[in-house]
Amino acid sequence: MYGGVKNLLNITPPANSINGANNPFDIGIDSEKNPELSFDPSYVYTSNQGIRGFIGLRYTVF
């Protein structure tokens, strides 16, 4: 038997942490002149999923 917990402290990024999430293909934006408006998910530093637990049973035949 095994079990565990992921993201024990339930730390998630704020809902607006991905820059340009409403326009992921940068349509209508000149990203050369305005890079702060372009889609950029590189600043997400933690899991987007909250606290999760799991349990299981592992067995071997032969």
Image (spheres, rainbow, N blue to C red):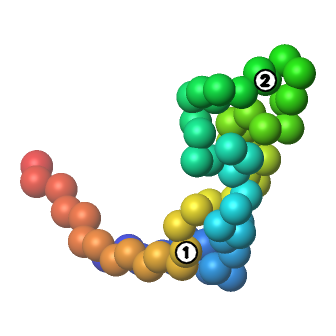
Residue 2's place in the image compared with 35, above or below, is below
Q: Indicate the amino acid at tag 2.
A: Ser
**Residue under the point 65% across and 26% down:** 28
Which corner quadrant holds the N terminus? bottom left
Query: Which residue lies most toward the left here?
Result: 61
Q: Is residue 22 above or below residue 6?
A: above
Measured as percent of width and height from the top left, residue 36 is found at 85, 38
Indicate the position of residue 51 as horizontal and vertical percent values. 54, 78
Using the image, determine if residue 20 lies above or below residue 59: above
**Distance Cα–Cα, label 1 vs label 2:** 32 Å
Q: Quadrant of residue 39?
A: top right
Which element carries disc 2, helix, strand or loop? loop
Mark 1: give few (<14), some (14-19) or many (20+) Cα within 10 Å: few
Query: Closer to the camera, 10 or 43?
Result: 43
Front position among marks 1 and 2: 2
Q: Could you say which is closer to the camera, residue 49 or residue 55?
A: 49
Asked if residue 21 lies left or right of residue 29, the reply is left
**Residue picked out by circle 1:** 50
Pointer 2 residue: 31
For the residue pair 61 and 16, the one nearer the viewer reads as: 16
Q: Quadrant of residue 41?
A: top right
Q: Residue at x 10, y 54 (%)?
A: 61
Residue sitting nearer the eye, 59 or 3? 3
Q: Which mark is residue 28?
A: none
Residue at the limit of the structure toward the right, as seen here: 33
Q: Position of residue 49 (x, y in %)?
A: 53, 67
Q: Is residue 59 toward the left or the right of residue 17 in the image? A: left
